[in-house]
């Protein structure tokens, strides 16, 4: 099906698909007009709709009393007031993503956001921040779970006999958190054998989390805290799909737009990353982003290597610990 819309009398009529891209006389007034492919017409209509929504928000904000008192706790033009960052779906909507759509389309880049990617109502962000805050100790837990999932094993055992008392306690506490938040089906603390046995969940979202998405959640939360602490206007997305004009597809792990114009792009790698450096260099150049704003967040990367790689390439290399510090230095 195709769609004809007359610019003279506003007639809207369905047409056969072969007419898409051609011109025809309006059946009502005779004025010549284009016949649009349906998806193209709907996309343009949605563009105008969301642009109008954003304009309404801007007008409401400008009409608000200058001496506004207590914060509302709502998302207002990309800013967070009293919102609990770890438990909100305020960001998971088209309006919040609107400035990001606009930014990419001005560069003639097709874009599609994943709304659920910034919904922190679940427990992904809490567990991700726990991992990012103590990766040196918890890394073995993550790797054992991931390996067991890949081998389709029903359980994974975490030995504690060679750990210090502090490390063993941290691992046991984390494994219990995984059970409390349903990341694992069961958690057995085996004191005689000094280990923790985890019965694994098979849900795709849980498998993806342990396969590397935890680092994306950690990076997203670092961005949100950065923006909130500095009271910056922003839009953000996780798992943002874009297609360049040459047809090359990319998925941007975390993308934040400050004040509607200043981008921060974060690519997260919990495994091997060196083979992708050229690809991300080309993407950074195509997006027109400064090197310090295109961040490669590599889990477990040493501070010395992060500094060295940043000096070698026009990209900013950080690890899960230094990401927040790097963000704080940007603006």
Image (spheres, helix red, strand yellow):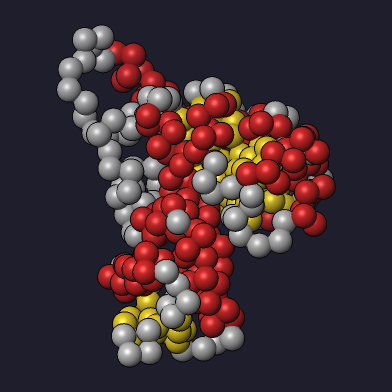
- Residue 203, percent from left and from top: 44, 76
Q: Residue at x 72, y 56 (%)?
A: 273
- Residue 192, percent from left and from top: 33, 90
User: Which one is in front, 83 or 322?
Assistant: 322
Q: Residue at x 60, y 55 (%)?
A: 300
> Is residue 231 in view from this perspective?
yes
- Residue 254, percent from left and from top: 55, 45
- Residue 162, percent from left and from top: 47, 77
Above-or-below relation of 159 to 254: below
User: Which one is in front, 327 or 253?
Assistant: 327
Q: Quadrant of residue 230?
A: top left
* Left/right of residue 276 with respect to residue 195 in the rendered view: right
Q: Residue at x 42, y 78 (%)?
A: 160
**Residue extending furthest left?**
70
Q: Residue at x 28, y 70 (%)?
A: 180
User: Which one is in front, 295 or 16?
Assistant: 295
Above-or-below relation of 314 to 181: above
On-image quarter of the N terminus: bottom right
């Amino acid at each position: 099906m195709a769609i004809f819309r007359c610019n003279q009398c506003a007639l809207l009529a369905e047409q056969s698909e072969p007419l898409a891209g051609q011109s025809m006389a309006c059946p009502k007034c005779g004025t010549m007009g284009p016949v649009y492919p349906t998806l193209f017409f709907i996309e343009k209509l949605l563009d105008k709709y969301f642009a109008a929504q954003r304009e309404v928000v801007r007008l409401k904000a400008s009409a608000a009393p200058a001496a506004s008192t207590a914060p509302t706790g709502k998302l207002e033009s990309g800013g967070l007031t009293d919102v609990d960052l770890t438990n909100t779906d305020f960001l998971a909507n088209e309006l919040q993503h609107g400035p990001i759509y606009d930014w990419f389309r001005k560069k003639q880049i097709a874009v599609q956001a994943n709304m659920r990617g910034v919904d922190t109502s679940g427990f992904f962000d809490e567990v991700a921040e726990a991992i990012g805050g103590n990766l040196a100790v918890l890394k073995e837990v993550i790797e054992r779970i991931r390996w067991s999932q890949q081998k389709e094993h029903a359980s994974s055992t975490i030995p504690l006999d060679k750990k210090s008392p502090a490390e063993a306690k941290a691992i046991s506490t984390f494994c219990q958190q995984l059970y409390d938040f349903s990341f694992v089906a069961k958690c057995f603390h085996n004191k005689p054998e000094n280990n923790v046995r985890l019965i694994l969940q098979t849900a795709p979202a849980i498998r993806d989390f342990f396969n590397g998405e935890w680092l994306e959640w950690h990076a997203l939360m670092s961005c949100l805290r950065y923006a909130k602490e500095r009271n910056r206007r922003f839009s953000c997305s996780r798992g943002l799909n874009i297609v360049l004009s040459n047809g090359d597809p990319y998925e941007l792990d975390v993308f934040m737009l400050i004040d509607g114009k200043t981008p921060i792009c974060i690519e997260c790698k919990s495994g091997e990353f060196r083979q992708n450096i050229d690809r991300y260099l080309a993407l950074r150049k195509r997006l027109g982003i400064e090197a310090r704003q295109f961040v490669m967040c590599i889990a477990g990367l040493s501070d010395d290597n992060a500094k060295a790689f940043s000096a070698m390439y026009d990209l900013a290399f950080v690890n899960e610990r230094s990401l927040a510090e790097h963000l704080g230095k940007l603006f």
